[in-house]
Image (cartoon, rainbow, N blue to C red):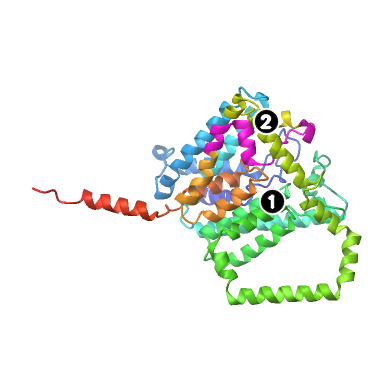
Amino acid sequence: MLRKLQYVCLIGCIGLADADRIDLFAGRGPFTLTPFLVLAPLVFILGLFRSEPSAMFRLSVTPETRRQLPFVAASSLFLLFTFFSIPIGLDPERGLVAFCDLLLVAALGYYISLQVLNEAEQEKLIVRSVTFALIAYAIFVVGECIAWTHGIVMTAQRSGPWLETTFATSSIGPWIPTLSGTAYDANRSGFVLTMYLALIDRFAAKSRYTPALRFAIAVLVFLTLSRSGVLCWLAYHVASKQFWSRLVSRRVLTGLIAILALGLLLFVKYQQELTAVAEAWEISDAISAKLSMDTGSSGESHVLLIERGLNTWLASTKTVMTGIGYAAAPKVLADFFGDDKRGNFHSLYITTLAEMGLPAFIALLFLLGYPIFGRRSSICAIAAILVFNLTYQTETEPLFWLMLALLWSYGRTNVPGLTVILDTRRASSFAVPKQ
């Protein structure tokens, strides 16, 4: 019974890892109590109840968990440098609260990765978790569409009745809603969906449900209308060898040519009608404002925030080494975000430099960079994480830590030169000594 309950909680934990639209406090608590913050500790507690008293806190070491040990060490260093930046930072109280959140999410993400690796039928677990995630996501998309038709739009403060704020959606211009599913932020939704795609490709690549799940993820990513989310999804595919092998196949090329030819014919035939509709709905203005780098645009704001972050980091020797303190960015970004305590530099790398300093940045680079060279089949997911965090930051996302821990558990990359050296040493160790 406990085993089934733990398994259900594990599926819900993975499927609702970043569902911040679901507040179990119903908007009446001091913070947003997401399902992950409830289900992940439940998985841990149920695991303790299922264990024998003598083995309650004993960790079974497998090759996968052994390969995660450098990840644990590097993550601990990153968290340690983050903690050391708080007492000498600009806002120690807020930094300490934010660090507790970061520590909890990182620890729970790592623990859930252990549960995934210890599961006997990993394929079924991941397929069920991702399917549940996409069903919940689709339900919220429908709810957002209904809210949009009733004129309910998300505000910066997310104030108002609980049910309205749960399903309120943002928009590009007056006619195009950004459907973000279980997350408030459409950018985060694109990242979360891409991480689900990475989980499927790793643990359930041969499942009969995988093609349908991949298609659903692609559709939902584009429905977010998020530049960062789409770039994250594209980076994952561009870094994949399978993507290029499929792209150059005759069937795919024929289909792409047919679609492009049909689209071109429709555009030529109905050019005036399409132009009139676009002007009436202000679609072109909305899209250009979203992608533009002109003054006042979203792109320019990102560039200015990155410049401000670099200038903040280089302000003194102290800030170069320890930063301004974790979560202290709102203190120096009041002219950008006003009194909004969620203001940040919109880049994980710039935020790490400006808030935690150079040592934490080096630890972060090791966390993200080593799997590219040291772990097999990790390039796609790492590329998606690296690209997304150029204009966003995901250090407080459960799926960030869960996926990163799983990537470190992959098999080691065979480096030819190193393999030859190791084989030579093994041969010499078994050589019979001369008499």
- Number of callouts in the render? 2
**Which residue is drawn at the image coordinates 73% and 56% (left, top)?**
139
Amino acid tagged 2: Thr
Which residue carries the number 1 mark?
Answer: 228
- Whether residue 48 sits left or right of residue 284 in the image: it is left
Drawn side of residue 336 relative to residue 229, left or right: right
Q: Residue at the top extreme?
A: 88
Magenta stretch, main secondary structure class: helix
Instruction: Name the residue beneath numbered marker 2.
Output: 312
**N-terminal of the two: label 2 or label 1?**
1
Residue 288 screen position, x and y as percent: 81, 54
Q: x, y (%) of residue 10?
A: 56, 49
Instruction: Examine the structure image and report whether residue 198 is included in the region drawn in magenta.
Output: no
State the extent of the magenta-drawn residues as a range. Answer: 334-363
| Amino acid at dot 1 | Ser
Name the foreground residue: 60 vs 225: 225
**Towards the viewer: 362 or 116:** 362
Residue 72 place in picture, x, y as percent = 48, 39
**What secondary structure is found at the residue carrying circle 2?**
helix
In the rendered image, the vertical position of residue 205 relative to residue 155, given as above or below:
below
> Which residue is at 72% across, 36% downward?
342
Helix, strand or loop status at disc 1: helix
The quarter of the picture where residue 23 lies is: top right
